Image (cartoon, rainbow, N blue to C red):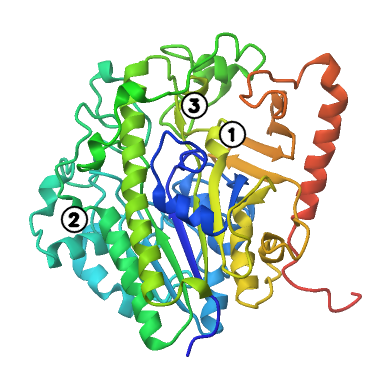
């Protein structure tokens, strides 16, 4: 009989921290609200990097992107890194990942570099054999994957197999397969202006996806999560299951009834405030231009993961996108509820630590920005975080204690009665979440490094009240008082009266950077 604590990590992709019903009554998430009522709602949680690969790699390694090496999209997390799954496997846990991984590049000229890339992405026979030939994979005994978001053409892997096996052999007609079927129009998540005639970066004239709801990858992730839990229960094993949902990452489209669940005219979207970029680094002001010359700063203006112009997106566009974005979240919430019900039916709910979070946030008009990019506003670096563990984590509590997703791996290990490996930089939060200890951190660090050069390379320190951002090789900087200026409209970095605060925050950033330096092995001799 399993007496060890089960561990369930549920993640969304690119979800704003306040898009939970418990934080925002405009959105309906009854099951995530149920999870919040069962445990603690952490309102000051931060990702270590506001893009997918770096943060997802940090979640399983307990290391910052600058340490594990998968520092941006298009890089690979090296397989030699110790992961939370490796440690739990050795302790007798079943370890399973269902949904999105994104530890490896989507496109690679070297097949040995990435199994998540073409042409293997669509080689269904390869994926049918994958769990017999390639696991454990990053510490997971069993994986079921797909790479696409919404109707992107990057579809295949275990999800395509599941659609075929469950009665949808013609699944290809529901996805945007173009040309050779490799590159489609959704290589990024930027919400493009409708008048540019480019429907390829998240925008849809019709956001209702014709794919039957029961064949959506959200349903697949929920069903296969429940099946993984059942298998472990039948075997009498404790489990670590990562239920990794793909939404609400753009493109913005979802099947009914979720597509029409919210009315665009009811959406309260973010806006640019006149003059808010006056004291910001020059690239912020350039996002207001129709054709900015980013090359004058040796910056990459291509794609939403560098700097881009967002000046031509209308409020109506944003309202329609947000209505769909909310529908995608509510659909995911429905399946999270099915998993909570499944745990309860199996009698496992009281013996399971459940954590819900997202890999990073999202812009929908705030500061005039869209999607994501190297702008460390709260909307994109702050994430939802709910944690429940009956008998340990208090129920129905809201906490403003600062959290970082780099802490999740050591926290899961602590809940399983295991120590933190020396290579992990994160801090075990289990005792603090349970009220048995003081919070182990008073700050969060967020990294952003897009290229091998220093073109886009910044770092942010967030404390209980202030936020500092510095740029490699630049005199630019950002300093906000989040208590007095929660909307981050007044950059204090160059203000004469804030130089003492700036010096203090710079010192705290240096100290925080020193504190997180790992020592992978103990010193065993004097020389």
Spot occupied by residue 299 in the image (x, y as percentages of width and height): 53, 26
Picture mark count: 3
Horizontally, residue 343 falls left or right of residue 420, namely: left
Residue under label 1:
378
Disc number for residue 307: 3
**3D distance between C-alphas at marks 2 and 3:** 36 Å
Question: How far, Cα to Cα, is label 2 from label 1?
Answer: 34 Å
Report the disc number at residue 215.
2
Residue drawn at x 56%, y 20% is 283
Res. 447 image quadrant? top right
Q: Residues within 10 Å of mark 3 (few under 14, many from 20)?
A: many
Q: Nearer the viewer, mark 1 or mark 3?
A: 1
In the picture shown, does residue 303 fall above or below 273? Answer: below
Residue 441 image point, x, y percent: 75, 52
- Viewer-side residue, 8 vs 164: 8
Q: What is the x, y in percent for residue 433?
A: 67, 60
Q: Secondary structure at mark 3?
A: loop
Q: Examine the rendering and report whether any part of residue 106 can be seen.
A: no
- The C terminus lies in which quarter of the figure? bottom right
Q: Which of the 4 image quarters holds residue 291?
A: top left
Secondary element under disc 2, as helix, strand or loop, is helix
Say which element carries label 1: helix
Vertical arrangement, residue 378 with respect to residue 240, above or below: above
């Amino acid at each position: 009989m399993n007496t060890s604590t089960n561990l369930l990590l549920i993640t969304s992709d690119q979800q704003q921290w306040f898009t939970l019903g418990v934080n925002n009554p405009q959105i309906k998430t009854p099951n995530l609200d149920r999870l919040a009522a069962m445990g603690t709602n952490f309102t000051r949680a931060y990702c270590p990097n506001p893009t997918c690969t770096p943060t997802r790699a940090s979640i399983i390694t307990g290391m910052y992107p600058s340490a594990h090496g998968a520092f941006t999209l298009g890089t690979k997390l090296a397989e030699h890194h110790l992961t939370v799954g490796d440690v739990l496997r050795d302790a007798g846990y079943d370890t399973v990942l269902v949904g999105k991984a994104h530890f490896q590049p989507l496109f690679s000229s070297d097949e040995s570099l990435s199994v998540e890339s073409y042409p293997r992405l669509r080689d269904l026979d390869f994926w049918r054999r994958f769990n017999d030939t390639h696991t454990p994979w990053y510490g997971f005994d069993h994986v079921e994957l797909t790479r696409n978001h919404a109707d992107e053409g990057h579809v295949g892997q275990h999800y395509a197999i599941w659609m075929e096996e469950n009665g949808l052999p013609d699944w290809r007609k529901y996805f945007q397969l173009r040309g050779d079927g490799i590159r489609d129009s959704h290589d990024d998540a930027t919400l493009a202006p409708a008048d540019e005639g480019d429907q390829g970066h998240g925008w849809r004239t019709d956001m209702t996806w014709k794919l039957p709801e029961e064949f959506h990858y959200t349903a697949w992730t929920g069903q296969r999560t429940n099946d993984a839990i059942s298998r472990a229960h039948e075997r009498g094993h404790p489990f670590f299951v990562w239920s990794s949902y793909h939404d609400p990452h753009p493109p913005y489209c979802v099947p009914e009834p979720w597509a029409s669940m919210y009315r665009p005219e009811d959406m309260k979207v973010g806006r640019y405030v006149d003059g808010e970029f006056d004291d910001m680094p020059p690239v912020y002001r350039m996002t207001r231009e129709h054709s900015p010359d980013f090359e004058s700063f040796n910056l990459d203006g291509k794609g939403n993961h560098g700097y881009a112009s967002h000046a031509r997106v209308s409020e109506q566009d944003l309202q329609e996108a947000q209505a769909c974005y909310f529908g995608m979240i509510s659909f995911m919430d429905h399946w999270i509820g099915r998993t909570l019900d499944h745990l309860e039916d199996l009698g496992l709910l009281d013996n399971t630590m459940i954590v819900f979070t997202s890999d990073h946030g999202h812009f929908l008009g705030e500061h005039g920005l869209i999607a994501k990019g190297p702008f460390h506003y709260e909307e994109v670096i702050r994430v939802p975080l709910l944690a429940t563990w009956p008998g340990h984590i208090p129920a129905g509590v809201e906490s403003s204690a600062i959290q970082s997703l780099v802490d999740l791996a050591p926290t899961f290990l602590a809940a399983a009665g295991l120590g933190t490996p020396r290579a992990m930089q994160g801090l075990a939060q289990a005792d603090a979440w349970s009220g048995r200890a003081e919070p182990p951190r008073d700050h969060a660090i967020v990294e952003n490094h897009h290229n091998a050069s220093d073109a886009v390379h910044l770092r942010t320190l967030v404390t209980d009240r202030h936020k500092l951002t510095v740029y490699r090789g630049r005199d630019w900087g950002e300093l906000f008082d989040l208590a007095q200026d929660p909307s981050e409209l007044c950059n204090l970095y160059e203000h004469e009266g804030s130089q003492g605060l700036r010096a203090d925050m710079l010192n705290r950033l240096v100290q925080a950077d020193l504190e997180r330096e790992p020592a992978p092995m103990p010193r065993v001799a004097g020389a």
